[in-house]
Image (spheres, helix red, strand yellow):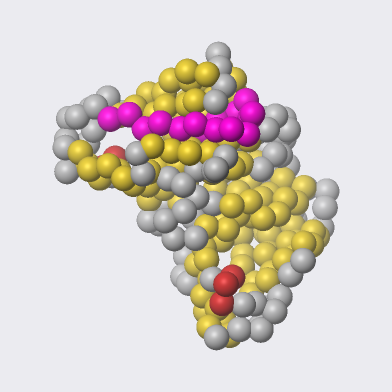
Amino acid sequence: SQKIEQNSEALNIQEGKTATLTCNYTNYSPAYLQWYRQDPGRGPVFLLLIRENEKEKRKERLKVTFDTTLKQSLFHITASQPADSATYLCALGSGGYQKVTFGTGTKLQVIP
Amino acid sequence: DADVTQTPRNRITKTGKRIMLECSQTKGHDRMYWYRQDPGLGLRLIYYSFDVKDINKGEISDGYSVSRQAQAKFSLSLESAIPNQTALYFCATSGRGPSDEQFFGPGTRLTVL
């Protein structure tokens, strides 16, 4: 069956460092991958989309990579700030039919 | 005003009661979704609707039903609530593109005693 794995343990990093979050998947050939941010008690908010034919996408301090051979996406936040503390979810989608499957999320804590 | 609203925001009910959660959107999207979120299990799709006449079951639809009253409104019902339906419920919408992002509501925290 399809499986999406995100590190269930919280990631703690020092302010100013680069945070790297991982999304691995098995038994899946996604056409695209999305990353969302979720704050406690609130709905997820979309951050970035990367398609299967793209290796890397950037948006301000955010960078996403997508390696379909390794079946992995990495999500980087450079120059991290305490305001970046949240849970980050990856979501995989198949082309032509817009229904995504979400990972369980990784909680990021940026320490001042 | 929020683009996707959910009512109620919090609800405590008893086993066996019928509960309706409501979702409204002002984004003009055709596609709407209901998810539940549980610790350690992430977001799981309950039902989704690609337009008013197109409603589909998600991965965990047992014990739930939905109604798409209009393009802007999508309701989720628990016919006879049970304790393991205690969770955080989210409504979401998206455009028609195959990779369009989803816009989520603020969530409804449901507790079934």
Position of residue B73 relative to residue A12, above or below, is above
Foreground residue among A94 and A98: A98
The image position of residue A11, as x and y in percent, is 52, 74
Q: Is residue B44 left or right of residue B81?
A: right
Q: Is residue B9 left or right of residue A93?
A: left
The image position of residue B97, as x and y in percent, is 73, 33
Residue found at x 17% / y 43% = B113
Q: Is residue A1 left or right of residue B21?
A: right
Does the magenta segment cover residue B32? yes
Q: Which residues are magenta?
A: B19-35
Does the magenta segment cover residue B71? no
Q: Is residue A55 left or right of residue B19?
A: right
Q: Magenta part mainly helix, strand or loop? A: strand
As drawn, the residue found furthest toward the front would be B1
Q: Kindly indicate the quadrant of the structure image that contains residue A17.
A: bottom right
Residue found at x 64% / y 29% = B28
Residue found at x 37% / y 24% = B65
The image position of residue B1, as x and y in percent, is 55, 43
Foreground residue among A23 and A29: A23
Do we see residue B59 in this rendering? Answer: no
Foreground residue among B68 and B98: B68
Query: Which corner quadrant holds the C terminus of chain A?
Result: bottom right
Position of residue A57 relative to residue A17, above or below, is above
